[in-house]
Amino acid sequence: MTSTQLTRNQTLVLGALSQSEAPLSAYTILDKLRGEGFRAPLQVYRALEKLLEFGLVHRLESINAFVACAHPHQDCCSHGLTAFTICESCGKVTEFHDHVIEERLAGFARDRNFKPGKTTIEIRGHCDGCA
Amino acid sequence: MTSTQLTRNQTLVLGALSQSEAPLSAYTILDKLRGEGFRAPLQVYRALEKLLEFGLVHRLESINAFVACAHPHQDCCSHGLTAFTICESCGKVTEFHDHVIEERLAGFARDRNFKPGKTTIEIRGHCDGCA
DNA sequence: TAAGTTGCGTTATGCTATAACGTGTGCCAT
DNA sequence: ATGGCACACGTTATAGCATAACGCAACTTA
């Protein structure tokens, strides 16, 4: 695990995400942090950019929102592929890692001589509680 | 295969996507169709909504863009899961279907009592030609 | 101390998507 | 045939997401 000292803004943004049950949009984060002196979207986006880089936060492409990583202590997030279920009712997000899927996608890419960068896997639906 | 008569706007939007090598954003489509009388984003979004419904077009969540379905004649797209590779250099998109991944994700959802709706799988990277 | 790097704040702008309202057309049940 | 309905369409306005470009301050390193 790589430990980096976070700046004040980064800490605040990560805190907002960690405290939230559901994923947050950048603008929602901004509103939550106005009390701390945040005034512009860029303050949020710049912090998010770093947090994503550090593997402490994930971006959910299909809903334009962000969540704190569920296993920030491990390094799993940084290289391995991360998949998500996203409940469309309550917003609950579950993060998981699957080696079989990872291999399968890697194989497909190899076959096509495609050099994979970031991979997105997101299942939107309804969680147990929201049936 | 379900065959539906497309409206003029739907035909024009699908045409724009079919002719394009790379995925197009809604606003790019709008610009391409100004000559045909398009004036507002909603004309494009409304057509896209229907085309997505018919399974003739896919939305690429990670780049906010749209592509014509590679196999519109089959029904594969409507139920089965569709995955994509997206070249970040040339924009080329390859669509594929993998039963193993599909099963694996379905199994994961079952285990968690998660009712899956739409699933997104997108690999961004670089295609053979763009190495 | 000069140059480079990094984070920060601000203003402005651009891109993506939808709300709300009204029009016209075709269908078909009465 | 006419009233009601469903649907596509057009328009204006607005909401929501993201970045460009500028300049300042703190810190590092040579």
Image (cartoon, coloured by chain):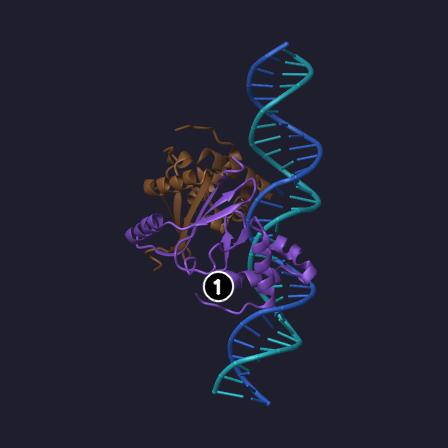
Chain colours: A purple, B brown, C blue, D cyan
- Judge by depth and name the residue closer to the eye, B15 or A117: A117
Q: How many marks?
A: 1
The residue most toward the left is A111
Q: Quadrant of residue C22?
A: top right
- Judge by depth and name the residue closer to the eye, D1 or C2: C2
Q: Is residue C25 above or below residue A12?
A: above
As drawn, is A67 to the left or to the right of C12? Answer: left
- List x then y, in percent, for residue C11: 69, 64
For image coordinates 39% across by 56% down, the residue present is A80
Q: Is residue B74 above or below residue B19?
A: above
- List x then y, in percent, for residue B51: 48, 36
- Judge by depth and name the residue closer to the eye, A87 or A26: A87
For image coordinates 55% across by 41% down, the residue present is B45
Q: Residue beneath label 1, please?
A: A54
Q: Label 1 is placed on what type of residue?
A: Phe
- List x then y, in percent, for residue B77: 40, 37
- List x then y, in percent, for residue A125: 49, 39
User: Is the residue marked by circle 1 packed among few (<14), some (14-19), or many (20+) residues within 10 Å?
Assistant: some
As drawn, is B113 to the left or to the right of B40? Answer: left
Q: Quadrant of the C terminus of chain B?
A: bottom left
For image coordinates 54% across by 50% down, the residue present is A64
As drawn, is A72 to the left or to the right of A36? Answer: left
Please, which chain is the residue tagged with disc 1 on? A
Q: Is residue B88 above or below residue A1?
A: above
